[in-house]
């Protein structure tokens, strides 16, 4: 039984529908079909995804390179780990309510796993912090609904992305998800607002660390400032958990900068997608 008082029946409504992606269900479904209209071959054995969280006009095709590979897959639970762009807090926040919603419908929160995770780790608390106006979980959900159908959601937002928090969350997720049918999604964009050539140089560091399946190198490069990723901490936590859960391979399947879409190379944002198996 959930023990989160007045929040336990709350439903988190869409915050960025109509801005980051279409708010009309029919239009949103059409957009997703278009983004996934030439899907990569479905790939069995996927345990994790890294994907961007910008507006679909910017990063949707990059995200689709990963999500298209999940076509036909089924998971009991999807764990989405995201950064907090709007609120500062310590540790990790897991949504205390019963569901997230998108224009495509309601996604139930996995209350049993949430309560177990809170009991397992002193880093994680049931809280609405980071779940209000935050977009970094929400933009993934229509993709997941479209390719997976029904699933339960464990929505996690990391506040202050310290090494201890990121690796501590990874260890807690390993213990939580051992033997379970779960997908782990890390939500991140890469470098922000550099000229395109510089952005690609910085992003190549993240890409190399992801390809090497090396969360410790990634954490070190983020701390040094030789790489940038707003969801670097979530990515470190996801990679750490996935390695401990037995995933052995990480394939980078998409990369772009906003300059590829806009033609403006003066100040861009980088986008990466990858799958772990």
Image (cartoon, rainbow, N blue to C red):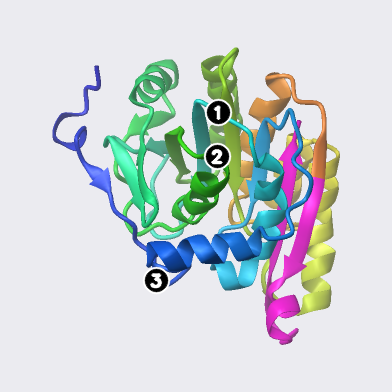
- Foreground of the two, 33 or 164: 33
Look at mark 1 in the image and give the residue it sits on.
75
Label 3, label 2: how far apart the Cα atoms are: 23 Å
Q: Does the magenta run of residues contain 169?
A: no
The image position of residue 277, as x and y in percent, is 76, 30
Name the secondary structure under disc 1.
loop
Q: Which residues are magenta?
A: 252-277
169 displayed left or right of 195: left
The image position of residue 177, as x and y in percent, is 55, 19
Label 3, label 1: how far apart the Cα atoms are: 28 Å
Instruction: Find out whether the residues at labels 3 and 1 contact each other: C-beta distance under 8 Å.
Output: no
Label at residue 250: none
Q: Earlier in the sequence, mark 3 or mark 1?
A: 3
| Residue at image point 40% right, 57% down | 134
Instruction: Find out whether the residues at labels 1 and 2 contact each other: C-beta distance under 8 Å.
Output: yes
| Residue at image point 59% right, 56% down | 230
Name the secondary structure under disc 2.
helix
Q: Earlier in the sequence, mark 1 or mark 2?
A: 1
Local crowd size for mark 2, using a 10 Å CA cut-off: few (<14), some (14–19), many (≥20): some
Look at mark 2 in the image and give the residue it sits on.
148
Label at residue 18: 3
The image position of residue 223, as x and y in percent, is 68, 49
Local crowd size for mark 1, using a 10 Å CA cut-off: few (<14), some (14–19), many (≥20): some
Residue 130 visible (yes or no): no
Number of residue marks: 3
| Residue at image point 39% right, 38% down | 93
Pair 3/2: label in front = 2
Q: Earlier in the sequence, mark 3 or mark 2?
A: 3
């Amino acid at each position: 039984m959930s023990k989160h008082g007045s929040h336990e029946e709350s439903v988190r409504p869409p915050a960025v529908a109509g801005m980051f992606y279409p708010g009309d269900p029919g239009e949103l479904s059409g957009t997703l079909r278009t983004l996934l209209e030439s899907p990569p071959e479905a790939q069995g054995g996927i345990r994790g995804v890294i994907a961007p969280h910008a507006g679909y006009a910017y990063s949707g095709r990059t995200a689709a390179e990963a999500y298209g590979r999940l076509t036909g897959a089924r998971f009991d639970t999807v764990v989405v780990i995201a950064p907090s762009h709007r609120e500062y807090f310590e540790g990790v926040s897991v949504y205390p309510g019963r569901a997230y919603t998108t224009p495509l419908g309601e996604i139930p929160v996995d209350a049993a796993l949430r309560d177990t995770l809170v009991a397992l780790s002193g880093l994680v608390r049931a809280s609405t912090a980071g779940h209000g106006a935050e977009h970094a979980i929400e933009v993934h959900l229509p993709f997941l609904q479209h390719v997976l159908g029904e699933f339960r959601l464990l929505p996690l937002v990391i506040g202050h992305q310290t090494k201890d928090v990121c690796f501590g969350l990874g260890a807690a997720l390993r213990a939580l998800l051992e033997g379970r049918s779960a997908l782990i999604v890390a939500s991140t964009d890469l470098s922000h607002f550099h000229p395109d050539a510089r952005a690609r140089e910085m992003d190549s560091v993240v890409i190399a660390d992801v390809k090497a399946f090396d969360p410790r190198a990634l954490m070190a490069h983020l701390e040094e400032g030789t790489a940038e990723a707003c969801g670097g901490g979530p990515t470190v936590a996801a990679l750490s958990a996935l390695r401990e859960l037995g995933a052995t391979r990480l394939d980078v399947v998409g990369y772009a900068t906003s300059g590829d879409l806009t033609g403006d190379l003066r100040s861009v944002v980088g986008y990466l997608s990858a799958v772990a198996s």
